[in-house]
Every structure is written in C-alpha cells, then in structure tokens.
C-alpha cells in the first residue's frame, strides 16, 4: 500500500512550482489528475525542447506518475466536467496567476459549495498585501525572499542560486500544507485553503540570514570572512561568499586539476572537534596549541590565512582523494559534484534518487526520483503522461461518464481531440 493511496488530486498546476508538489503526492500514492488546456497543455511541454516532437525534459521531469486530461475550463461543458472533478477529488492544486481561478468562475465559495471537504492548495508569488496581484517566477522569488541579497561575494552583485528554492522549494512547502490539511480533514470533515507564497517559502529557507540580520546589532558577524579582513558591516546581512557558520567555518577550496576543471573543488569544514587532525594533515602541528589558533573564537580573524594553508594541501589532491583521506579522520568535506557526475553516480541510482525512465516519444531519459524515502511506501517512478492520454479513462472511470453522456462531452470540444492519442 502507498501512503496516499485513495487520495484524489485535481492537479491544475503548470510550469514548475505546482507540478513539483503534485509529483511528490503522486509518488506517495495519490491519484494525480493533471488538467490541461486542450491542444496546448502545460506550457513546459514545449519549452526547452531537445527532442523535436516529444515533450521536453522540463515537462517530463516534473510530471511523473500523473494522468492527463485535456479540458477547457472556460467552455460550458468543460465547466461541468470540472465541477464533477471538484466533487470527486479531495484536493485541488493550482498555481495560476492571481485571480485566474475566479475568472474561470471557480471562486473558493463556489468550490466549497460543490465540495465542502475540498482542500484548495495554491502557490502564488506573494501573500496578501501590496504585491499579491503580481505574477512571479523563480528568480523573482529568490530576490524578494532574501536569497539573492545574501548570495554571492561581498564585492559582487546579488546572485541567484541554481537550486530552485522559489519554485521547487515552494512546491515542497505546499505539499506539506496539503498533507497536513488532509490529516485535519480526517478529523474535522472540513476542507480548507492552503496557500504557499513563493516569497514566504524563500524567506523560510533564508531563516539563518534573518537571524544574522538581528545579530548585527550586537556587533560584527565574526564567522564571516569580512570580519577577519577588517571590513565593516553595513545595515543588512552581507553576502558571505562560501563561508559557513560560527564554530565550524568552511570554504570551497581548489583541488588538483582546478586549472582545467571548473568543478575540481572541495568544501572543507574546519570543525572544532577535529582541529588537531586538520593541523597534522596540512603540516601545521604547532597550530594545535599556538596562541591565536588553538580555539575556534581565536581563529575567526585568521580564516583567510588558515584556509589558504589548507588549500595548499587540497590542491595536491583530487576532490575525491580529499574525501577519502578526510572522511576516516572525521573531517567534514564534500566534493563539488558536477551535474554530469551526479547523473552518473551509481550510489544515487541504487537509492532511486537518480532514475532512468522510458518514454514512448523520447526514449530513455534520466530523471530525479523521489528524494524522500518512506520505508512503508516505496516509489516507482513512471513516465509523465502524453497530453490528454487519460482523457477518456478519467471521464469514464473517475467521473462515470458513459454512452451518450460521454459522447456529448467529447463532441462539445471541451476535452480536445480524444482520437488523437488513440491514433498515436
Ligand atoms: C507562472 C505564471 C507567471 C504564468 O503566467 P501565465 O503564463 O500568464 O499563466 P496564467 O496562470 O495567468 O494562466 C493563463 C490563462 O490560461 C487559462 N487557463 C489555464 N488552464 C486552462 C484550461 N485548462 N482551460 C482554459 N483556460 C485555461 C487561465 O485561466 C488564464 O486565463 P486568464 O488570464 O483569462 O485568467 C503565473 O501562473 C503565476 O504567477 N503563477 C503563480 C506563481 C507561480 O507558481 N510561479 C512559478 C511558476 S514555476
């Protein structure tokens, strides 16, 4: 049995934030019915196309284990079908631009009228307030959520990060909101609205940076490199480059081959507990007891010197050799893995975090599987649906349309060309 078996999700999501959420719910066993505009579908099907005529990786990697129904929710028959879907499903997930659902005629009041137990889960760019009507994409959320102003180097511009904390991060927040609301509904019998604004999700992930903002009142942030460099702090949490926290300073350091390989680097943490081992390793045994080096607070104004010395050592080893030597000593290090190395990693394939999926139009492709492992609810990643692949199946099996009623819906044009899939 799967954890969310029996839960039906009306998946009205598109692009990245919403689809990451519903994909997780599908992996945990929910029946996720993706509602897509006839003939068009989720815009990402046709974005960043690498195999002409096939759904893009952008789409396939975000929509595994779902079923697809084509449905025009602005057409009268389409609205009828959508109403039946709302009656039947437990959760409706959407990430349209603000007001789009209302414009379709499906306000929260109307949804509750149709199904009082419905959980309506939404991603929006911003919560209620000045910006609530704005459309938002990933990098806007990273900027408005405090990530960009605290990422990068002090003497450079703000930077966005490659991890999609605005989109996929908010999808994760929304998924937690949904399962929590489902749990509450089991006892209350009532649905509710779940809202995950992207700005709020990024702020949540930037919690430690807001911690540092308040610590500024008490003096300089001593674990930041700029403290040791004698550079004054301003009014807001600065960009910290690759520094890591307080008693356990860390840096990204060059490894053997860095001149040619952009990822020949390691992260190296001078954890206080293993300071003596680090000193021996890099050939500075006297630092173990020397005044100014022996304790973590003393070292904070010497981080540049210390890490330069450690880097002299790491530059003589590959990033994997650094890992092999440091791990047995309990020194926390991590190779900077390229996307190529991650995709080829045997260990990640064994755990199902990297999977190979077969697709009728694009053949085999690599994807990221479920990153959360439930021992009692194993995940088998199946391919994303073709546009409208399950239209008739859903009309029949989920909504009970048959015979003349089914023919009427098909002929109305509300569900696209149902013969197209059969012919393919
Ligand atoms: C992502 C975003 C900027 C895209 O904007 P967009 O391409 O203009 O798409 P919208 O969400 O506005 O939807 C476009 C229209 O398609 C319509 N539509 C979508 N599915 C439909 C369907 N099955 N049948 C009929 N119409 C449909 C919508 O009703 C909307 O019409 P309207 O403008 O008349 O109200 C916007 O959806 C958004 O801000 N979403 C919330 C935040 C978010 O999730 N951002 C990250 C995305 S990764």
Image (cartoon, rainbow, N blue to C red):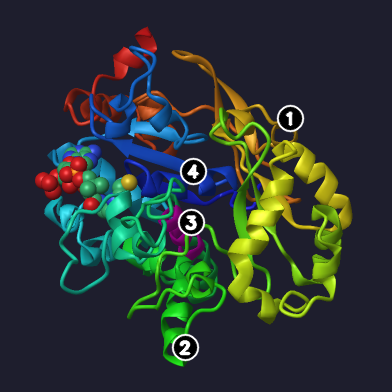
Q: Which residue is mark 2?
A: 219
Earlier along the polypeptide chain: callout 4 or callout 2?
Answer: 4
Earlier along the polypeptide chain: callout 4 or callout 3?
Answer: 4
Earlier along the polypeptide chain: callout 4 or callout 1?
Answer: 4
Image disc number at residue 172: 3
Earlier along the polypeptide chain: callout 2 or callout 3?
Answer: 3
Q: Name the spot of residue 256 as percent of width and height, x first.
A: 68, 35
- Give the Cα distance between marks 2 and 3: 35 Å
Label 3 sits on a secondary structure element that is helix
Earlier along the polypeptide chain: callout 1 or callout 3?
Answer: 3
* Picture quadrant of residue 296: bottom right
Q: Residue at x 45, y 55 (%)?
A: 169
In this rendering, would 407 be left or right of 17?
left
In this rendering, would 163 be left or right of 311?
left
Marks 3 and 4: in contact by CB < 8 Å? no
In this rendering, would 344 be left or right of 55?
right
Of 118 and 307, the residue lying toward us = 307
- Give the Cα distance between marks 4 and 1: 24 Å
Q: Which residue is mark 4?
A: 23
Label 2 sits on a secondary structure element that is loop
Q: Residues within 10 Å of mark 2 (few under 14, many from 20)?
A: few
Task: Decide if ligand 1 comes within 8 Å of the CB at mark 1.
Answer: no
Q: Is residue 264 visible?
A: yes
* Picture quadrant of residue 420: top left
Against 311, residue 185 (above or below) is below
Q: Write down the region rendered in magenta.
A: 169-177
Q: Which residue is mark 1?
A: 346
What main secondary structure does the magenta stretch of the protein show? helix
Q: Residues within 10 Å of mark 3 (few under 14, many from 20)?
A: many
Q: Residues within 10 Å of mark 4 (few under 14, many from 20)?
A: many
Q: Residue at x 20, y 36 (%)?
A: 72
- Give the Cα distance between marks 1 and 3: 26 Å
């Amino acid at each position: 049995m799967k954890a969310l078996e029996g839960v039906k999700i009306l998946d009205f999501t598109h692009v990245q934030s919403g689809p990451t959420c519903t994909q997780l719910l599908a992996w945990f066993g929910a029946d996720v019915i993706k509602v897509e505009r006839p003939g068009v579908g989720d815009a990402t099907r046709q974005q960043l196309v690498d195999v002409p005529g096939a759904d893009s990786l952008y789409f396939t990697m975000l929509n595994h284990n779902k079923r697809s129904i084509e449905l025009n929710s602005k057409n009268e028959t389409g609205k009828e079908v959508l109403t039946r879907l709302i009656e039947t499903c437990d959760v409706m997930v959407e990430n349209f631009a603000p007001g789009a659902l209302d414009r379709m005629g499906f306000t929260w009041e109307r949804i509750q009228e149709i199904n009082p137990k419905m959980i309506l889960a939404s991603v929006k760019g911003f919560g209620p307030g000045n910006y609530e009507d704005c459309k938002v994409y990933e990098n806007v959320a990273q900027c408005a959520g405090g990530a960009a102003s605290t990422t990068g180097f002090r003497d450079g511009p703000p930077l966005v990060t490659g991890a999609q904390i605005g989109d996929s991060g908010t999808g994760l927040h929304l998924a937690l909101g949904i399962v929590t609301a489902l749990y509450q509904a089991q006892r209350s019998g009532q649905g509710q609205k779940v809202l995950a604004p992207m700005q709020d999700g990024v702020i949540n992930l930037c919690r430690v940076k807001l911690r540092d903002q308040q610590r500024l009142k008490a003096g300089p942030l001593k674990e930041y490199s700029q403290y040791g460099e004698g550079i004054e702090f301003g009014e807001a949490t600065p960009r910290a480059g690759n520094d890591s926290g307080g008693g356990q300073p860390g840096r990204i350091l060059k490894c053997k081959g860095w001149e040619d390989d952009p990822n020949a680097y390691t992260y190296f943490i001078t954890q206080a507990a293993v300071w003596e081992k680090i000193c021996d390793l890099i050939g500075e045994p006297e630092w173990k007891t020397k005044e100014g080096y022996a304790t973590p607070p003393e070292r904070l104004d010497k981080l540049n010197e210390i890490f330069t010395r450690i880097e002299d050592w790491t530059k003589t080893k590959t990033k994997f050799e650094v890992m092999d030597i440091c791990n047995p000593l309990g020194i926390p290090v991590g190779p900077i893995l390229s996307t190529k190395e991650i995709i080829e990693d045997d260990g990640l394939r064994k755990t199902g975090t990297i999977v190979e999926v077969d697709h009728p139009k694009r053949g085999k492709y690599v994807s990221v599987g479920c990153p959360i492992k439930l021992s009692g609810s194993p995940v088998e990643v199946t391919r994303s649906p073709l546009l409208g692949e399950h239209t008739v199946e859903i009309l029949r099996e989920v909504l009970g349309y048959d015979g003349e009623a089914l023919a009427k819906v098909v002929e109305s044009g509300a569900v696209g060309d149902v013969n197209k899939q059969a012919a393919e």
